Image (tube, helix red, strand yellow):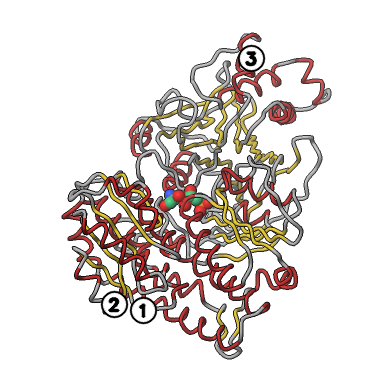
Amino acid sequence: MCGIVAYLGDKKAKPILVEGLKRLEYRGYDSAGLAVIDHGRLQLVRSAGRISDLESCLAEQELEGSLGIAHTRWATHGAATTENAHPHLDHTGKIAIVHNGIIENFATLKKWLISKGCTFRSETDSEVIANLISLFYYDESQSDQAGPDRGLEIRLETAVRLALRELDGTYGIAVVSSEVPDVLIAARRGSPMVVGLGDGEFIVASDAAAIVKHTTQAIYLGDNEMVVVTRDGYRTITIENDPVAAKIEQIEYSLDRLELDGYAHYMAKEIFEQPQTLADCLKGRLDQTSGQVVLGGIASLSRELVRAHRIGIAACGTAWHAGLVGEYLFEQLAQLPAEVDYASEFRYRNPIIEQDTVFIVISQSGETLDTLAALQEAKERGALVLGIVNSVGSTIARQTDAGIYLHVGPEIGVASTKAFTGQLAVLTMLALYIARRRRMSQQMLEHYIRALRRIPEQISTVLEQSEYIHQVAQEYHQRENWLFLGRGYQFPVALEGALKLKEISYIHAEGLPAAEMKHGPIALITPEMPVVFVAPKSSQYDKVMGNVEEVKARGGIIIAVATEGDETIRDYADHVFTVPDTLEELQPMLTVIPLQLLAYHAALIRGHDVDKPRNLAKSVTVE
Ligand code: M6R
C-alpha cells in the first residue's frame, strides 16, 4: 500500500528518496513521485507505473536540493495516473504533501475549498490536505494564532495543525513548502510514521525499511502527533499543540534479510526458508530441560490467561486463516471457547466481550487497518488484547497489552507464506502454554513439544517435492476454476491454498469444508475441474475419503495432500503431494507447504509477477 519517504539533511535528497521508495516497493503501488526544494523552488516529478518509470523521468532532472518528500501510491480515490500520483501541491504550487490513508470527509472539504477559490488538479482525497494547509497558511486571521513575530516555520506548523484538525479518517503525511525551505513536517493518525535520526540528517518514512540504511535510531510517532524537523533539530507535538516527550528507540531491522539470496522471487525465498524461519520462531520457546513452553512476551499475564473464559481472535486474509486454526487449537488443547472474527467485520456487529475475555489480533505487518480497529474496539470493550505480530515496533504491536513476535524475518512477497507457518507455530505454543496451566498433563505437553521440534526438518522434506509440484502446476495451470477441500484443521489450510492460488495466479479458487461440497458446490464438478483435497491421516480421514470418492465418481481431477505412506489415497487421486506424519494439531504447518508451491509455480507459468500481484498491497492500511 502507499509508502512515504522524506529527507532533510546535508546530502542530495533525490537519490536518498528514490532508494527509500525502492525499499517500500514490496508494499504494492501503482505510481510514484517526489518533490524536492531545489534552490528555493519546489520541483515535482511523478509517474504512473513502477519506480523505474519515475527514475526515467528523473534522469533529466539535476535536483540539488537536500529537502524533499516522496511517495508510492496504491490507488483508492482516482485511477493510477500521473495526475493522481503524489506529491500533491496546493493551488499556489508552493506547498507539497504526501499522504497515506483515507480522508473520509474529503468531498465536503473539497467543495468548501473550491468555494474559497482553491483549484484542484487530481481526483484524490489527498489534495484537499495540501489546499487546507495552504488556506490556513495564507489566511491572515489564522496566522494570528501563530502569534506576532513568529517565523514562517511556526506559521507552517500552525497551518498543518489546523488543517489536520479538520480531517476525518486516517493519515500519515509529510509536508514541505518552498516558502519555508528548511522545514519538514510529518504527522500521523492511524497510519505509521517513523522519524529516523541520522548524523546531521533526518529520514522520515512510513516504514522502517526505508530508514535503516541511514540510521537505526528512530522515533515512532503516535496518533495525532506531529514532528517538526529543521536543520537544527526536531520537535514533537500533538495536533492540539501540546508538547510530546519523544522516545528514541532502536530499530530492529536487518537489511541482509531483504536480499533475494539467489532466489528469483521473494515468495520463493520465503517459502524455502521456512525450515529456518520456523526454527527461529520456536527458538528459546520450547525448553527441553524443563519441558515448558516459554513465552516471555506474555509471562506477566499468565494469571489472566489461565483465568480467561473465552478467546476472541481477529485478523484478515492469511492471518485470519491462521486464526481459524487457532480457534480449533484453543478449544482442543486448552478447552477454552474461542472464536475468530474477520477484523473488518468485528466492530460493525456490536461484539459482546464478556468479562475475562482474552482477545488476540494476528497480523504479519502489524499495520493492517481493520485489524488495528478491531484491537481498539476490543480494548474499549474491556478485553485484554494480545498481539501475534511479525513486524517489530509496528502499530499493532505497540497498541496491544502484550504479545508474541513471530521472529520469521521481514516478509516481502505480497503472498504471505512464512508468516502463516510462524503464526500457526505461535498459536500452537500459546494454546499449549495455557493448556498446561489449566488441564494438560506434563507428559502430554512434552509429547507436543517433541512433535513441534520436528516440524522445521519435516518442512524441508515437503519442499523437496517442488519439482513435482511444478509439473502438476504445468499440467493444470490453464484451468480457471479450482476447489480446495479439507476438514477440521485442514479446512483453514484449504482456504489458504485457495487464497494463494487466487492472489498470485489470478485463478478462481474456492476453499470449503469438504463436507459442504455436497450442499451445492458439487454441481461444479466436471472432468475439467481440479479439486485439491487436504487429506493427511487424521481423525477425519475416513470422512474425507468419502468426499474424495464423491468427486472421483463425477470425474473431477483429484490432487491430494496426504501423509507419507498413504497408499489408499493414491488409488483415487491423480496426483499426491506428501507430508510427513505428525500430530493432527500440527499438520497445517506441513500441509500448507505444497499449496504455497502450487500457487507459486502456477503463477510463474502463467507469467505473473508473483511478488507484486496486480491490485494487491502487502499491508492494507485503508479500510
Ligand atoms: O499484515 P497482515 O497479516 O495483517 O495482512 C493480512 C492480509 O492482508 C494478508 O494476509 C493478505 O491476505 C495476504 N496477501 C495473503 O497472502
Question: Few, some or many C-alpha atoms within 10 Å of disc 3 (few <14, some 14-19, many ≥20)?
Answer: some
**Secondary structure under badge 1?**
loop
**Could one spot residue 178 in this view of the protein?**
yes
Q: Could you tell me which residue is drawn at 31 percent across and 52 percent down?
A: 483
Q: Position of residue 595 (x, y in %)?
A: 32, 60
- Name the residue beneath numbered marker 3: 113
Which of the labelled discs sits on residue 291, or is there none?
Answer: none
- Name the residue beneath numbered marker 1: 581
- Left or right: residue 472 compared with residue 440: left
Estimate the spatial distance between the alpha carbons at disc 3 and disc 2, rounded to whole Å: 67 Å
Looking at the rendered structure, the kind of residue marked 2 is: Glu
Compared to residue 49, the image places residue 205 above or below, namely below
**Which residue is most to the right?**
148
Question: Few, some or many C-alpha atoms within 10 Å of disc 2 (few <14, some 14-19, many ≥20)?
Answer: some
Looking at the rendered structure, the kind of residue marked 1 is: Asp
Mark 3 C-beta to ligand 1 under 8 Å: no
N-terminal label among 3 and 2: 3
Q: Position of residue 104 (x, y in %)?
A: 61, 28
Looking at the rendered structure, the kind of residue marked 3 is: Leu
Q: Position of residue 260 (x, y in %)?
A: 35, 60
Question: Few, some or many C-alpha atoms within 10 Å of disc 1 (few <14, some 14-19, many ≥20)?
Answer: some
Compared to residue 555, the image places residue 568 above or below, namely below
Camera-side mark, 1 or 3:
1
Could you tell me if the residues under marks 2 and 1 are in contact, i.e. CB atoms within 8 Å? yes
User: Foreground residue, 595 or 63?
Assistant: 595
Camera-side mark, 3 or 2:
2
- Name the residue beneath numbered marker 2: 564
